[in-house]
Amino acid sequence: MSKEITQHSVNTKNIKREIVFADIGIIILGLLMVIFPADASKIICITGGILLGIWGLLKLVSYFAAVKNGPFSSFGLAQGATFVCVAIFLILAPQFVKPFLVAVLALVLMISAVMKIQYTVDFLRLKNKFWYIALIGAVVSIALGTVTLFNLNNTAKWVLLFVGISFLVTGAWDIACVALLSNASKTLTLDQKDSEDDASSKDRKRLKDKN
């Protein structure tokens, strides 16, 4: 049981690390769109390609560095290779991505909204008072993504500036939700451990009294 708990903890940390990495990437892209809205299309492709390439390389290194890979761990190899290939395409051929750029950015905002809905459910399951923060974030991300969807064929400077600000907001909000959820989960785990220790102590005391 202890090994299962340890493995679950490791998997949770890895997932959390990947989510935070993705959110940092979103914030970086948002910042670049705000600073360089006129050249945002090319900058997004190159920077996004670099970030995706780093992510892919980390997955590949993690896969080959693992002492023992389970039957489903091969996804790390497939994901890493896919990320690296897409990254190379983004860096070498950004002109092919430009017509679909706003649609991709809108999709990222919608995915971020779905993630915040997931956080809301997780907060509620933990009976945590911060559930409304994730829910408000989901509503905001949906609104930002919807506005972006209505401008799919518009690559004007103000659209990319708007998306850049949206990325900054949704990325920072996601990181805040992850931090709050992680803290809530740790607090619950500690409370459960203390409760189990108390129950175990009482059981030992009853056994001692009987003897």
Image (spheres, rainbow, N blue to C red):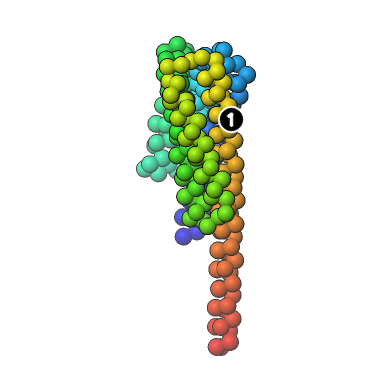
Which residue does the image show at 54% across and 50% down from the upper left? 131
Q: Is residue 116 left or right of residue 28?
A: left
Q: Residue furthest left?
A: 71
State the residue position of label 1.
Answer: 168
Which residue does the image show at 55% across and 73% down from the upper left? 199
Which residue does the image show at 49% across and 33% down from the upper left? 143
Which residue does the image show at 55% across and 88% down from the upper left? 210
Relative image position of residue 172 (x, y in whole percent): 59, 35
Disc 1 element: helix
- The amino acid type of the residue labelled 1 equals Leu
Q: Is residue 124 above or below residue 37?
A: below
Q: How many marks?
A: 1
Q: Residue furthest right?
A: 35
Q: Nearer the viewer, residue 53 or 142?
A: 142
In the picture, which quadrant includes the C terminus? bottom right
For mark 1, does the 10 Å Cα neighbourhood hold few (<14), some (14 to 19), or many (20 or more) residues?
Answer: many
Q: Can residue 180 be seen from the camera position used here?
A: yes
Relative image position of residue 82 (x, y in whole percent): 41, 26
Relative image position of residue 50 (x, y in whole percent): 53, 22
Q: Can residue 108 be seen from the camera position used here?
A: no
